[in-house]
Image: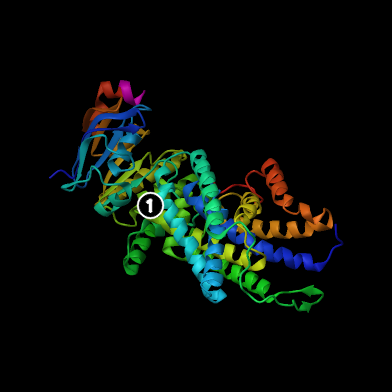
């Protein structure tokens, strides 16, 4: 059974079709990166998969269930969690409140506490900033809050939109390391990354999206070695 | 014009309490739905008139009638969302603003049709105000101040300490992200309308107790409420409350420098000066 399958998706805003027949398949435990030029529809593709945008055509199945028309607020119940690129924390909520919101549908207090501990273990910097407003944190710390909140429900699939965007170069390495760790601990990861070389080298597989369609796919290494990909999508 | 009298400060606290309540309700609704509901004043008037009906027409004691009026305003807020605002959910703030202006006319005139356009009073004893330190203080006014303080405190406990309140603030920050977190924002919107409607009802009933009831009572109070919301930084609940007390005090103290007929102008003046000089509110950076 395919873990996540998006088939011939079409979606967009108003009359503008941004994602135009893109497809994707991934297996449980994989880390997959979507690369492509600006405006290729990468973010829109992710938003469509998680239900923030309506699927106009095509289907999405996740762990054997049809989730094509599942809205974003229910996607989390199926075990997928989306971390947007920008606006991924609530700026006027404290770090603790943000993490609580990450566990919104979680009833059990003991489970909440243990997940919280898990997040602090992964992002120790957050532990002594619990009462700081997320909007007052640095970009890197905000990204940690966003990922931490996303992990509070222990999702089967973490979907990340440009996790390294806006981070200082040394933090980019840290962030990729964290993502690899999360993946090694059993959470499948699907991400869009501008930092394509770095992301592909960490990923099991990569998919090239262009003009709203999936153009190529292969293992991270294959795409990195491909002259065509290098020329068209990776820059020099 | 009058010479300064500590009495004005007391009056300012009373009207400030009412304005603060209205401003909190209005700003909460703005926070999650991103539009200023011009009909909010009519929600207040509706609550007051329902209480009036229960009090004078059904002969209920004021406390019971007041609770009835408050619940009435809460139900009205939810019903109007279902019947009207829900249909315009994804439209621009301008469309929603115009819709709420239309709704405010309809509501105000419905009140006029049901209860008549004359001035009404609750059936409560008119008391001689006892005087403390040269300030005459009515028990009703003390009740208004304590009750609104209680409601404000309760609302902040709701917003800070409960899951649903944190979700309201979260959705006010970012509705999309709240959905990603698993919040059913449509249901949350109804809770916000309920809280906003109940607060409007409380403010309306107390406004009626403090003075008289007229179909225009809510609409005329909307200007100082609006000024308080702007002064406090739109969408910021704490700012709205501080703004509310500030406008109330300013209005009552203004009679020292201008004739008292011009008192209602203060709200407008603060609104204009505020928008010109501090468009993001008194406390600097806006929450949105």
Tell whether A138 sits left or right of A55: right
Q: Nearer the viewer, residue B119 or B216?
A: B119
Instruction: Find residue A62 and report its horizontal and vertical position in percent.
Output: 20, 46
Whether residue B249 appears in magenta in the rendering, the answer is no
Give residue B47's position: percent from left, percent from top. Answer: 53, 62
Residue lying at 56% horizontally and 55% vertically, measured from the top left: B112
Assign the N terminus of chain B to one quadrant of the image.
Answer: bottom right
The residue labelled by disc 1 is: B186
Q: Is residue A122 left or right of residue A128?
A: left
> Can residue A98 be seen in the rendering of this structure?
no
Q: Main secondary structure of the magenta part?
A: helix
* Chain ID of residue with mark 1: B
Element carrying mark 1: helix
Q: In this view of the protein, which residue sits in the foreground, A103 or B40?
A: B40
Q: Which residues are magenta?
A: A231-236
Left or right of residue B230: residue A31: left
Q: Is residue A212 above or below residue B92?
A: above
Examine the image and state in which quarter residue B66 appears.
bottom right
Residue A234 magenta-drawn? yes
Q: Position of residue B98 (x, y in %)?
A: 52, 41
Packing grade of label 1 (10 A; few <14, some 14-19, many >=20) is few
Colouring of the image:
rainbow
């Amino acid at each position: 059974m395919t873990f996540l399958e998006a088939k011939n998706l079409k979606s967009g805003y108003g009359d503008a079709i941004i994602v135009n027949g893109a497809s994707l398949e991934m297996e449980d435990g994989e880390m997959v990166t979507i690369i492509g030029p600006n405006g290729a529809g990468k973010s829109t593709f992710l938003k469509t998969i998680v239900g923030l945008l309506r699927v106009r055509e095509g289907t999405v199945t996740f762990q054997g269930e049809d989730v094509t028309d599942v809205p974003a607020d229910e996607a989390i119940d199926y075990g997928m969690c989306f971390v947007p690129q920008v606006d991924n924390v609530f700026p006027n909520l404290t770090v603790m409140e943000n993490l609580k919101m990450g566990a919104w549908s979680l009833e059990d207090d003991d489970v909440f506490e243990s997940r919280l501990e898990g997040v602090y273990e992964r992002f120790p910097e957050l532990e002594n900033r619990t009462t700081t407003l997320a909007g007052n944190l640095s970009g890197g710390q905000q990204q940690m809050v966003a990922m931490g909140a996303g992990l509070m429900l222990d999702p089967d699939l973490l979907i990340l939109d440009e996790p390294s965007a806006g981070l200082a170069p040394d933090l980019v390495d840290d962030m990729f390391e964290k993502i690899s760790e999360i993946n090694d601990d059993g959470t499948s990861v699907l991400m869009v990354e501008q930092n394509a070389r770095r992301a592909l080298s960490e990923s099991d597989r990569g998919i090239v999206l262009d003009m709203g369609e999936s153009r190529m796919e292969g293992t991270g290494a294959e795409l990195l070695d491909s002259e065509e990909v290098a020329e068209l999508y990776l820059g020099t | 014009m009058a010479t300064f009298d500590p009495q004005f400060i007391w009056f300012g606290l009373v009207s400030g309490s009412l304005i603060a309540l209205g401003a909190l309700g209005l700003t909460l609704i703005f926070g999650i739905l991103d539009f200023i509901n011009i009909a909010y004043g009519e929600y207040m008037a509706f609550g007051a008139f329902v209480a009036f009906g229960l009090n004078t027409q059904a002969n209920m004691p004021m406390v019971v009638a007041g609770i009835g009026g408050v619940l009435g305003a809460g139900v009205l807020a939810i019903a109007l969302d279902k019947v009207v605002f829900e249909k315009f959910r994804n439209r621009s703030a301008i469309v929603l603003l115009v819709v709420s202006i239309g709704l405010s006319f309809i509501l105000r005139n419905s009140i006029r049709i049901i209860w008549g356009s004359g001035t009404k009073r609750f059936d409560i004893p008119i008391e001689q105000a006892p005087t403390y330190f040269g300030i005459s203080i009515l028990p009703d006014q003390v009740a208004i101040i304590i009750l609104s303080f209680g409601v404000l405190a309760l609302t902040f406990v709701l917003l800070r300490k409960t899951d649903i309140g944190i979700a309201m603030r979260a959705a006010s920050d970012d509705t999309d992200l709240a959905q990603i977190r698993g919040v059913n924002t449509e249901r949350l919107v109804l809770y916000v309308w309920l809280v906003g409607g109940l607060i409007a009802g409380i403010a309306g009933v107390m406004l009626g107790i403090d003075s008289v009831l007229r179909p225009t009572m809510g609409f005329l109070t909307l200007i100082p409420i609006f000024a308080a919301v702007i002064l406090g930084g739109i969408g910021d609940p704490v700012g709205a409350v501080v703004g509310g007390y500030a406008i109330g005090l300013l209005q009552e103290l203004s009679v020292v420098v201008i004739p008292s007929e011009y008192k209602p102008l203060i709200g407008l003046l603060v609104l204009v000066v505020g928008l010109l000089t501090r468009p993001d509110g008194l406390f600097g950076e806006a929450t949105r």
